[in-house]
Amino acid sequence: MDGLQTWVINLDRAPERLARISAQLQRLALPFERLPAVDARAFTPAQQAQLDEPAYRRQHGMPSLPGELGCYLSHVEVVRRFLAGGADCALVLEDDVVLHDSLPAVLRGLLAQPSRWDMVKLSAVHSGTPVPVLEVAPGHRLAVMLSRCTGSSAYLMNRRAAQAYAQGLLPMTLPYDHVFDQGWRFGLKVRLVTPTPCGHDDRIASTIAAPPSRLRKFHWTRRLSTHAFRVRNEWRRLVYGLGQALREKLAGP
């Protein structure tokens, strides 16, 4: 797959996770480059300054976690290194992802249709209410999302998406997977492959080390701004998704 560079985000203190995903990538014949993840245990003042904590609390309804900032900055660093290189597209993987056998075929199908996407999610926590628009591999279709679809363990982006992210991701005001799929915000064609060719292994503990969200959430009286933000955000997502689905329908197969 000419023009594709694969990145694996991995903490220096998690060699067992690197070994696990390395074996999966070797099985699928996908060479990769490791990106040392930003470690929340050793933030620099400049890294810490990339978090807008008041905005995060207003929009997310809870305080941020150091691991969330580390994850966010790690993805931003992938964007920067991708743009500094010569590859056309980047496959970005977190080290706890599960890669299915269909992934190479899906990647080839997506690379054969470069005008139909800027960023494609290859894994998902929520369904995203997908509207399929194009088959990219047997049993897998490119789709527009009409609802929330969190998770950032596997995605494909082109240079246009990376340039938009480099200009607009910082400072951090939400977890990374709540931001990077906002196609209306970045002016991008954001898509999902359904069913996804990558998954999440729930047996692997998250390195973010988050307590249950119910213990982090502010009292409901302090989350009114969060509810208002989410209503606006999901309305924009729906309007954007319907518009993108119409565009795809007019474009045809």
Image: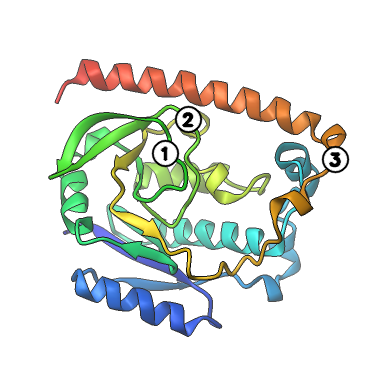
- Locate the C terminus by quadrant: top left
Q: How far is mark 1 from mark 2, CA to CA?
A: 8 Å
Q: Amino acid at mark 3?
A: His
Secondary element at image label 1: loop
The residue that disc 1 covers is 127
Q: Position of residue 201 (x, y in %)?
A: 43, 64
Residue 48 found in image quarter: bottom right
The residue that disc 3 covers is 219
- Locate the N terminus by quadrant: bottom left
Is label 1 in contact with label 2 (beta carbons under 8 Å)? yes
User: How crowded is the residue under tag 1: few (<14 C-alpha within 10 Å), some, or many (20+)?
Assistant: some
Q: Position of residue 35 (x, y in %)?
A: 45, 71
Which callout, 1 or 2, points at the residue further toward the start of the chain? 1
Q: Nearer the viewer, residue 152 or 91?
A: 152
Q: How far is mark 2 from mark 3, CA to CA?
A: 26 Å
Q: Residue at x 40, y 74 (%)?
A: 34
The residue that disc 2 covers is 147
Q: How far is mark 3 from mark 1, CA to CA?
A: 28 Å
Q: Amino acid at mark 1?
A: Ser
Q: Nearer the viewer, mark 2 or mark 3?
A: 3
Q: Position of residue 129 (x, y in %)?
A: 40, 31
Up the image or down, 235 lies above or below 50; here it is above
Which callout, 3 or 1, points at the residue further toward the start of the chain? 1
Secondary element at image label 2: loop
Q: Amino acid at mark 2?
A: Ser
